[in-house]
């Protein structure tokens, strides 16, 4: 037990090695595929368990439940969760405030050791977590592995970043004084993640906040609360004190609104849709009675991401990159390519090759590791089908468009609509599914103008063999994450700090060197010598 009342089962480790991304698993290796199958079988026997709210370490049951189901087979319940109503905001806040009083004083090295311990536990049980992702949100094996790998990366990266921040100093020492710059935590934060990276984004947002000394109320998405419950189990195993992370699954409009509005909420870390992000922004801006600070909001939102293909590009590489970016995890990534903008001289050949490439994609239950699994739920599928109907009027359907019946799951074929105008609905609104619009342009300059013509600004890519065009795109393509001659998905922690411009969010750059500043405030101390 330390002065701050903190006990950890994790012994702070030897000096930290340099940060490196967690390697991807190669599921073509028979022993790796076998490990994944065994994990899927083992997790199958744990499906349907009930999980509690965790507030200040107490386990609580509520009358209302959230049933998380497998989108590939909705009759299969993955987990039954308590549904926190607005009345649970006050107890969760009290627990987080109480924990904050000790957690804020826990040495940074101890907080860091907790993150590293969690990373190690998750690494040891990697296939098990992959299996949970397959069941809860329908990720195929490689997508699940990328999500778990990114979770480990966030924990390892933010651990090192916290140590770096603790060594900060003022830019100069004023003569006759000793000057210090100390990054102190903010207080209690609301962490509100989306369902599509239910492990990495949820765990990363939480870890960044707590490693800085904040405590949080974590409200996971109702589509993926089981991953959050599993994360809490890991944090408890490594000795996280009660109340540092309070787990409250609940609905956005009830619990979500109430935690955002609470006068003691110091910051809101949100990732999700534009509509909800903007609503949180407005709600958080209104000062509540008794509130003594301006709430800080970190809002990462949607995208309408483009890949621009110049006539001088390697067309096969561009087709591969676009198909991977558009249809990986059924296009349910904020970074997914939903618009391919093609220069006229190569447009027809490009359309044909995309059609051929998409025809080869396999679709089915992600348990069997096809290219394409289900989309997250019935409402999402219906919305995508409505967009496809609009798209058929706005352009020419060249692939997909149907919702195949497989085990009652929420499946949608990878869909491509050609000859879409730059201002068409299909070219402007986030669909968040496997629907790709192809847009023809007459020049590279026109292509860049089209790439910039939405209200979003998250990711983008350019395929060209021209150095001049790359330089022009670097200057003019207005997105937070720009890629050259590669896909626009798959940001790696540390290498591709992630966050968007315009209506894609506050450009917080998760996985980057500035991220922890968002969860800290700098105290400047000057002592006369
Ligand atoms: P969503 O906005 O529907 O929900 C996100 C979270 O907000 C969920 O936990 C939800 O319960 C909660 N919520 C809903 N209403 C709320 C309210 N009124 N107050 C407080 N919380 C509320 O988004 P989603 O469907 O879970 O995720 C998909 C969206 O997330 C897409 O738009 C995608 O582009 C975006 N996304 C962005 C990034 C990024 O880094 N920019 C990453 C992943 C996903």
Image (spheres, helix red, strand yellow):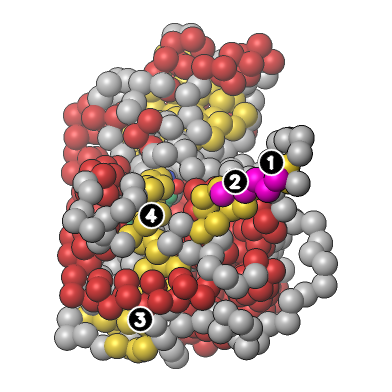
Q: Is residue 362 above or below residue 502?
A: below
Residue behind mark 2: 524
Give residue 170's mark: 1
Could you tell whether 230 is left or right of 38 in the image? left
> Counting residues from the N terminus, which is met first, the one under dot 1 or under dot 3?
3
Report whether the residue tagged 1 is closer than 8 Å to ligand 1. Answer: no
Pick the front one: 182 or 458: 182
**CB-based contact (under 8 Å), mark 2 and mark 1:** yes
State the image quarter where residue 430 is shown. top left
In this view, the mark in front (1 or 3): 1
> Counting residues from the N terminus, which is met first, the one under dot 2 or under dot 1?
1
* Residues at marks 1 and 3, CA–CA distance in whole angstroms: 38 Å
> Counting residues from the N terminus, which is met first, the one under dot 4 or under dot 1?
1
Pick the front one: 282 or 129: 282
Residue behind mark 3: 55
| Image location (x, y in percent) of residue 255 | 22, 67
Magenta stretch in the rendered image: 523-528
Residue 336 visible in rendering? no
């Amino acid at each position: 037990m330390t002065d701050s009342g903190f006990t950890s089962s994790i012994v702070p480790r030897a000096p930290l090695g340099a940060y490196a991304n967690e390697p991807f698993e190669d599921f073509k290796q028979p022993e790796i595929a076998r490990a994944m199958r065994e994990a899927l079988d083992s997790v199958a026997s744990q499906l349907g368990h009930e999980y509690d709210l965790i507030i200040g370490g107490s386990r609580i049951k509520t009358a209302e439940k959230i049933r998380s189901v497998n989108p590939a087979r909705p009759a299969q319940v993955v987990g039954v969760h308590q549904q926190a109503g607005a009345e649970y905001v006050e107890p969760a806040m009290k627990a987080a405030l109480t924990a904050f009083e000790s957690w804020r004083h826990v040495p940074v090295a101890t907080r860091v050791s907790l993150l590293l311990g969690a990373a190690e536990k998750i690494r040891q049980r990697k296939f098990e977590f992959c299996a949970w992702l397959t069941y809860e949100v329908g990720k195929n094996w490689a997508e699940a592995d990328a999500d778990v790998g990114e979770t480990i990366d966030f924990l390892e990266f933010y651990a090192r970043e916290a140590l770096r921040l603790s060594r900060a100093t003022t830019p100069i020492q004023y003569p006759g004084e000793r000057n210090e710059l100390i990054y102190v935590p903010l207080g209690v934060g609301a962490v509100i993640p989306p369902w599509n990276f239910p492990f990495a984004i949820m765990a990363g947002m939480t870890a960044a906040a707590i490693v800085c000394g904040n405590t949080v109320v974590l409200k996971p998405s109702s589509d993926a609360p089981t991953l959050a419950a599993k994360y809490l189990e890991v944090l408890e195993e490594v000795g996280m004190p009660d109340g540092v992370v309070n787990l409250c699954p609940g609905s956005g409009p009830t619990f979500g609104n109430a935690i955002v509005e609470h006068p003691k909420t110091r910051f809101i870390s949100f990732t999700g849709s534009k509509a909800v992000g903007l609503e949180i922004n407005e709600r958080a801006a209104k000062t509540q009675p008794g509130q003594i600070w301006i709430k800080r909001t970190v809002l990462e939102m949607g995208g309408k991401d483009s890949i621009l293909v110049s006539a001088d590009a390697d067309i096969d590489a561009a087709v591969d990159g676009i198909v991977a970016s558009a249809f990986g995890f059924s296009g349910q990534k904020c970074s997914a390519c939903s618009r391919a903008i093609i220069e006229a001289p190569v447009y027809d050949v490009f359309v044909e090759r995309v059609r051929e490439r998409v025809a080869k994609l396999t679709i089915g239950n992600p348990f069997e590791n096809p290219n394409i699994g289900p989309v997250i739920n019935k409402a999402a599928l219906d919305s995508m089908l409505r967009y496809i109907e609009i798209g058929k009027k706005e352009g020419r359907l060249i692939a997909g468009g149907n919702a195949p019946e497989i085990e009652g799951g929420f499946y949608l074929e990878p869909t491509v609509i050609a000859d879409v105008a730059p201002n068409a609905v299909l070219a402007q609104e986030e669909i968040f599914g496997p629907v790709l619009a192809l847009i023809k342009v007459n020049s590279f300059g026109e292509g860049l103008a089209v790439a910039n013509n939405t209200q979003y600004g998250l990711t983008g890519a350019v395929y060209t063999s021209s150095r001049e065009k790359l330089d022009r795109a670097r200057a003019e393509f207005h997105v937070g994450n720009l890629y050259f001659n590669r896909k626009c998905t798959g940001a790696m922690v540390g290498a591709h700090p992630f966050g968007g411009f315009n209506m894609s969010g506050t450009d917080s750059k998760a996985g980057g060197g500035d991220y922890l500043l968002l969860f800290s405030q700098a105290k400047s101390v000057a002592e006369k010598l």
